[in-house]
């Protein structure tokens, strides 16, 4: 299940013409926000994804979102090596 979710989130991040927030990745993939958060952390660590600076929040109590995008130096096929967990 984790490998399938990782593949979904990675594909959604790489396919987007513009960086997507974790919340947008969760909405697009139908994977829970908590799971997307853990998976993005796993992808940011080795450099498969890069997170941008936190965007200003529209709501007062809401968290600030960060956009996720493919690391330009990392080919999409390289992320497949992290699917073993």
Image: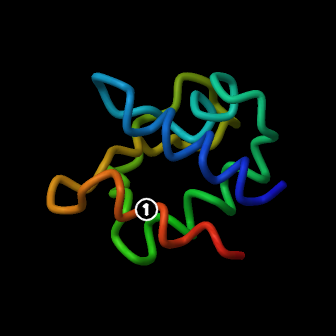
For label 1, the residue is 79
Q: Position of residue 15 (x, y in %)?
A: 38, 29
Q: Camera-side residue: 68 or 8?
A: 8
x and y percent of residue 23 in the render? 63, 34
**Looking at this view, is 43 or 81 the one in front?**
81
Q: Would residue 10 appear left or right of 72 to someone viewing this image?
A: right
Determine whether 62 is above or below 53 in the image: above
Q: Residue at x 37, y 26 (%)?
A: 16
- Classify residue 85 by image quadrant: bottom right
Left or right, residue 56 beside residue 33: left
In the depicted structure, whether residue 58 falls above or below residue 47: above
Residue most extreme to the left: 73
Q: Residue at x 84, y 54 (%)?
A: 1
Looking at the image, residue 56 lies above or below residue 28: below
Which residue is rendered at x = 54% and y = 71% of the image? 82
Q: Count every numbered label the image shows and give the total.
A: 1
Can you say whether 27 is above or below 76 in the image?
Answer: above
Q: Residue 3 in the image: x percent, y percent?
A: 71, 58
Q: Residue at x 35, y 56 (%)?
A: 77
Q: Residues within 10 Å of mark 1 (few under 14, many from 20)?
A: some
Q: Quadrant of residue 45?
A: bottom left
Mark 1 element type: helix
Find residue 9 and report its horizontal and vertical position in percent.
58, 43
| Closer-to-camera residue (12/63) | 12
Coloring applied to the structure: rainbow
């Amino acid at each position: 299940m984790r490998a399938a979710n990782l593949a979904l989130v990675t594909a959604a991040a790489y396919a987007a013409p513009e960086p997507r927030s974790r919340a947008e990745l969760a909405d697009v993939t139908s994977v829970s926000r908590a799971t997307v958060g853990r998976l993005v952390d796993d992808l940011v660590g080795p450099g498969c994804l890069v997170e941008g600076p936190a965007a200003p929040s529209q709501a007062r109590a809401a968290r600030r979102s960060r956009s996720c995008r493919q690391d330009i130096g990392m080919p999409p096929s390289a992320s497949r090596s992290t699917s073993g967990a």
